[in-house]
Amino acid sequence: MSPQADKKRDIRMLQIATRGLAALVVLGAGSAMAADEGKALNAGHEYMVTTNYPNNLHIIDLASEKLYKTCQMPDAFGPGSVQMSPDKRIAYVLNNHYADIYGVELDSCKQVFHASISQLPGEKARSMFSFTISHDGKEIYTVANPTKMFSDHYEVQAPRLDVYGTDGGLNAKPLRSFPAPRQLTIMQSGDDGSLYVAGPDIYKVDVKTGKFDVIVPSRNWKRPNYSAPDVLYVWNQQTYRHDFSLLYTASKFKDEKQDPATAEYVYGFFNIDLATGKSQTVDFGPLTEIYFSGMRSPTDPNVVYGVLNRLAKYDIKEKKLIKAATLDHSYYCVSMNKAGTRIYLAGTYNDIAIFDADSLEPKGKIQLPGGDMAITTAQVFVR
């Protein structure tokens, strides 16, 4: 056999061997994934759940600060916002380009719920981060923003609040629907059964009648010598403080002349206690930079953290920055453990940054399989 023929034979054998090895790796990875997906969570343990591309649902064990398991989600990713059932057994995810809500049983990674936001013939509907679970775990609420699709034009329709039963299975249909205001985003359920929804103002909604009442004026607040607040907040977090909170920025003028040259620019938060329904509008510090999400400490209500390009810590009563930490890239979503000792930063890339809550010293990172988390909402909970 000629040297050229020998070379071709060797290349051919290498190709066959490489394909065989690849097949074994894929088979082994599939078996490992199957075993991993079936690994149940442990009672009393604290976990963090988040999502990322291509369509993963990750559970992190916060005792070890390592990835515990990964569930594969159906359809497409985006935005990957997560809401946990009250018993912490099912993660509900707004996904598939804002078009569907999925329920995933965390112990088994089995899909147990699915609802399409588009419900009527000829419509395409999306939910802009607007979904949550009722306080008793029996219902799911979402705001659909529908567009009627015609062959030669589209017609934007009125938004609606849709209410699903969590027992609706994989082809869930609304139990009831109500007209809703425009521009609604994140929401949480109160202990009395009321639904709190952020929009131009923050509304308290009777989910039996569909009645919307303003509980916290936002765009329409009447604070003397303040500009209208600016709100950009889409991280729908279920907190250990059991509150519903979102950040705002505003101009605070010296007098009725409202001269922007002498104004203070402030950061603050709207907050609703989900147990009592009591609301607050609180300035907590000067506006020096933009934060995408914020969270008060679960153990010290006078401390609030914000994150985007830096991690910052504020004294609310003193209205001052206490400390700040430099980040190697932006993070969108700040979370904390129940003890209030650790901060976990998610969103953007596929790593979760860990910081000491007191000193803001970095304590490592958790690398996730897959791609970007983008604008996911992470949740921390105890099973």
Image (cartoon, rainbow, N blue to C red):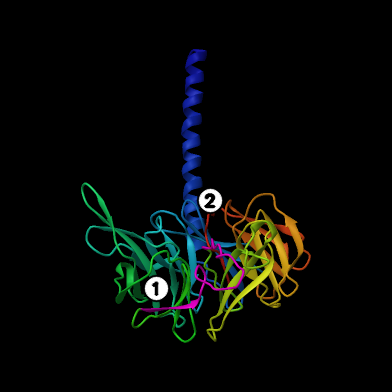
Q: What stretch of residues is rendered in magenta?
A: 211-234
Vertical comparison of 93 with 78: above or below: below
Using residue 321 as the reference point, say whether residue 82 is left or right of it.
left
> From what the image shows, is residue 38 above or below residue 30?
below
Residue to which mark 1 is pinned: 141
Amino acid marked by disc 2: Gly
Q: Is residue 280 in sight in this rendering?
A: yes
Q: Return the residue nearer the eye: 132 or 48.
A: 132
Give the amino acid type for the residue marked by disc 1 in the picture. Answer: Tyr
Residue occupying the far top of the picture: 2
Q: What percent of the width, then of the height, locates residue 270?
A: 57, 73
Secondary element type, mark 1: strand
What secondary structure characterizes most of the magenta part?
loop
Rendered residue at 47%/81% (across/down): 135
Q: Residues within 10 Å of mark 2 (few under 14, many from 20)?
A: some
State the residue in front, 197 or 140.
197
Q: Position of residue 163 (x, y in %)?
A: 35, 75
363 relative position to 278: left or right: right
If you read the primary sequence from the N terminus, does the residue marked by circle 1 or circle 2 appear first?
1
Front: mark 1 or 2: 1
Of residues 157 and 360, the one nearer the viewer is 157
The image shows residue 348 at horizontal and vertical percentages of: 57, 52
From this view, report whether residue 154 is shown above or below residue 300.
Answer: above
Is residue 46 within the magenta segment?
no
**Label 2's element?**
loop
**Residue 65 seen by the camera:** no
The image quarter in which residue 65 lies? bottom right
Q: CA distance from mark 1 to mark 2?
A: 30 Å
Give the residue at x 51% y 24%: 10
Q: Which residue corresponds to mark 2?
A: 370
